Amino acid sequence: MDVMKDQINEMQLRQLVDMIRYSAGSLQSFLDYTLKQAILLTGSQMGYICCCNEEQNRFALSSGLEKSANDQQMDTYQQAFLKAHARVLDEVKLSRKPFVSNQFERRKTETKPDHVVIDNYMTVPVIRDDEIMGVIGLANGQGGFEESDILHVSLLMEAVFNVVIVKQAKEELELLSNRFKLANRVAMIGVFDWDMKSDSLFLDEQMVELYGLEMKAGRVAHSIWEKIIHPDDLNQVQDLIRQAIESKSECTAEFRTINNSRRIRLLATVDTDESGQPIRMIGANWDITKEHEDYNKLLETNRRLEDEVIERTYIEDALRVSEEKFKAIVDTSPDGIAITDMDGIVNFVTDRTVEMWGYDSKEELLGRNAMEFIHESYLSKAIYFIGEMINGNLTGAAEYLMVKKDGTLFYIEANANILKDKDGNPTGILYIERDVTERRRLEDEMKEMAQKDQLTGLFNRRKIDEVLLENEPVQTRNRLLSVIMLDIDYFKKVNDEHGHLVGDEVLVSVGQLLTDGIRQTDILGRWGGEEFIIICPDTDLSGARQLAEKLRIKISNHIFNEVGQKTCSFGVAQLKADETVDDVLSRSDSALYLAKEMGRNRVVTEEAFYTP
């Protein structure tokens, strides 16, 4: 009978696991459903599931179930059996295995009439990478808990937490995506992705709205996009884009649209393939029509104000009108306005400037030098720009990093104009300032996206190439540099036997193991496919070999989901005097090839084949 019972329970458990594997709905409903099934599977009366962070000693209750017994309702499942949770959890943490008590202490003196008495108790941990990821607790199983209950619940929770991890990742990704879309909509920023091979562009909803197109978000031919640009601006935009592609750099442009006469600002970056050839351009557009109009109006008004100020000793009426106009502009301007004398002492600020700089009143700013509010890293730039502007060699806007009263940092775009008297002598400087912190943040995010591998989050090959070129002349500075190349052994077999999703999980796990194992000064990247690269500054060949050996052992001891153990082969080389990074990359790659020829799962240095 026991054998038949186990077979029936095992069949039910497998059916349940299949249902869980393709479970839909929210993470909370999924955990609630799982707990109910575990209770039914073991014949229990109550239970709970905790998602855990053992490293931070945090155990967050994710799902709990209350049941009645003999018409007595317990207050909460916490009061019923979580009082003993701390002691039981300590047992589980020490033993790293399930805990079962079929003769649980009743604690008669502490039991209240409306509490359910706990006769027996089972706690099963879910362990990944030797860390407790979650705990399921079950109580009052009919006839006590057996070994088969532990086995079934353990198998169930292993499957459950596979789904939990995926669902948590999906929910976080969806939340991040929705926040990004909302931020774009609030900031009126559209995003595009130009695939140069197919010569097609993906436009998001905001881009479609900006251009006034009668379509939904999606792909259009590149030629369609060019037809939207005003003919008078098209050649200039094409030239800027071509220059960015040729130099593999960022592109900034402004143009008018034909459909709705809007003025658009474009900011984009070029992405390349493994061989360094441009393959796509990713960027953002936003409507600057009103900003452009307001800015031009403000500049024109400023020029008129300068003329009126020059003539103020002769035309009193004109001065009064000028002051009224200036006040109207100040009161309605979305930008901050500040005026200093030629020594930089602030003698005028608007309310918007006070607010932008994080102060409480104008009096806190007046009489102080404007340089006091600029971050020290931008002081030399500000001094240079103002000097060149005074000398007539520079005009236009410049960005500065500013410091608020409370120490908060923010970026402004400042357009400065020299104020002059009737004889043309400079008397002061007028600044029109706009807070561009959010714009800079979005630009920085786009730059970071262009440098990271989408799967592993490590530096991509383009970024690693930049780092290598920056470190190429290290020998001329009497510094050391070594390179470690590594490749996952028999990785194709993982994809063939388990599928590319499992292969991707292995790549991500190896990337995390390497990240945890390298030093703070080392630079890690995905070189391509299943190949990774580690740049080790201030490290000779022996030190790099020791690091590679430590990483090899760390990876070979790791148990990968569905795959089990995997190994990696390593090739190590040191950059020598008067040679290029291509030379050291070639030697480390040759050492890696030799490691595979010698049987894999080993570290080979350039000394194995290279004689100085």
Image (cartoon, grey):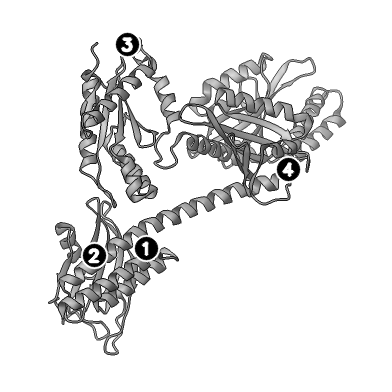
Tell me the kind of residue under disc 1.
Answer: Arg
Q: Nearer the viewer, mark 3 or mark 4?
A: 3
Mark before the other along the chain sequence, 4 or 1: 1
Tell me the kind of residue under disc 3.
Answer: Ala
Q: Gap in Å between the C-alphas at discs 3 and 1?
A: 56 Å
Label pair 2/4, CB-CB below 8 angstroms: no
* In front of the other: 282 or 414: 282
Tell me the kind of residue under disc 4.
Answer: Thr
Answer above or below: position of 587 versus 551.
Answer: above
- From the top left corner, tell me how far across and down residue 431 is, in percent: 66, 29
* Neighbourhood count class around disc 1 (C-alpha, 10 Å): few under 14, some 14–19, many 20 upward: few
Give the number of the disc on residue 21: 1
Give the number of the disc on residue 332: 4
Q: Secondary structure at mark 3?
A: loop
Q: Gap in Å between the C-alphas at discs 2 and 4?
A: 67 Å
Tell me the kind of residue under disc 2.
Answer: Ser
Answer above or below: position of 415 versus 517.
Answer: above
* Neighbourhood count class around disc 3 (C-alpha, 10 Å): few under 14, some 14–19, many 20 upward: some
Mark before the other along the chain sequence, 2 or 1: 1
Residue 219 in which image quadrant = top right
Q: Is residue 369 visible?
A: no
Q: Which residue is mark 2?
A: 154
Label pair 3/2, CB-CB below 8 angstroms: no
Q: Which residue, as the protein is rendered here, is positioned at the far left?
A: 103
